[in-house]
Image (cartoon, helix red, strand yellow):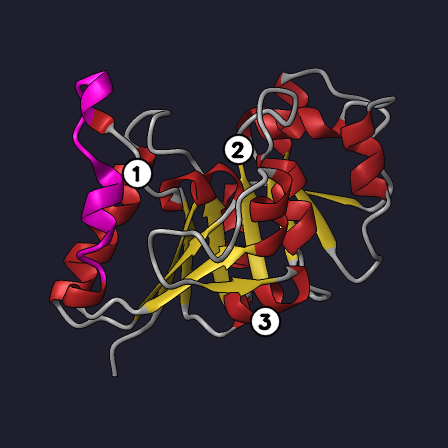
Amino acid sequence: MARSMLIITRQSPWSGPSAREALDIALAGGAFELPLGILFLDDGVFQLVQAQQAGQLQQKDVTANLQALPMFGVESLYAAQRSLQERGLDQNALSLPVEVLDDTALRALINRYDHVITL
Amino acid sequence: MATLHLLSHSPFADSRLASCLQLLAAEDALLLSGDAVYALQAGTAQRQALELMPGSIALFALEEDVVARGLAALPERLQAIDYAGFVELCCRYDRTNAWL
């Protein structure tokens, strides 16, 4: 039985390679059918904003690539309610279908996985 | 089912520690290494936050990082460890969460 992993991504798409690296781990794991989850925490929730235009900054569009996750079998997607609220983001206007969790639910989520990594 | 949280960045430079404190479950533990041990600096909000954690949450720090930085007046609840202890802790808990 493959061991499960939760990837916690907590940087915006614009603050360096962290968001991209988290996505790469998820896509690689998904391709091997590992049981993976992704939690968008802190500035990581900014990855879920719609209509971002990476081309304006001559960058590749991480947020567009996030849409590939369900195709790679990564469908356990979560976002921290507190992080969304702090940043004024509407949980109904995100670019991916994520389950929004409060702090108590986040603690339970982390406890369900064999491995956890925070990028 | 408990998690050992590994922090190695200064809590004065970013929000890893603050976020981690919000996600700690009752039996989890915190292990400070590198610049994260500056959270032990007396008289700071970060130190106070560590003191206010529930008693069920264990607090560890890598001793050489603490000593190298000249930190004194450490919290009573702090358990100083060496690298062998670091490894032992990683095995003792169900999982680790490295806040990279």
Is B49 within the magenta? Answer: no
What amino acid is labelled 3 in the image? Ala
On the picture, is A11 further left or further right than B83? left
Q: In percent of the image, x 59 and y 24: which residue is there?
A: B10
The residue tagged 2 is B8
Give the image quarter of residue B12.
Answer: top right
What amino acid is labelled 1 in the image? Ala
The C terminus of chain A - image quarter = top left
Is A60 within the magenta? Answer: yes
On the picture, is B79 further left or further right than B64? right
Q: Are marks 1 and 2 on the same chain?
A: no
Q: In percent of the image, x 65 and y 16: which residue is there?
A: B69
Residues at discs 2 and 3 in contact (Cβ within 8 Å)? no
Residues at discs 1 and 3 in contact (Cβ within 8 Å)? no
On the picture, is B78 further left or further right than A48? right
Q: In percent of the image, x 44 and y 52: which residue is there?
A: A93
* Neighbour tally class for label 2: few under 14, some 14-19, many 20 plus, Cα within 10 Å: some
- Disc on res. A61: none
Q: Considering depth in this image, is A99 or B66 the residue closer to the camera?
A: A99
Dot 2: what SS? loop
Dot 1: what SS? loop
Q: Considering depth in this image, is A4 or A59 the residue closer to the camera?
A: A59
Q: Do labels 1 and 3 share a chain?
A: yes
What amino acid is labelled 2 in the image? Ser
From the image, state whether disc 1 or disc 2 is nearer to you.
Answer: 1
Residue B81 appearing in the image? no
Q: Report, in whole angstroms, how far the alpha carbon at label 1 lies from the one at label 2.
A: 35 Å
From the image, state whether disc 1 or disc 3 is nearer to you.
Answer: 1
Give how far across and how far down residue B2 sits, in percent.
60, 68
Q: What stretch is highlighted in magenta?
A: A55-69
- Disc on res. A108: 3
Q: Is residue B16 above or below residue A55?
A: below
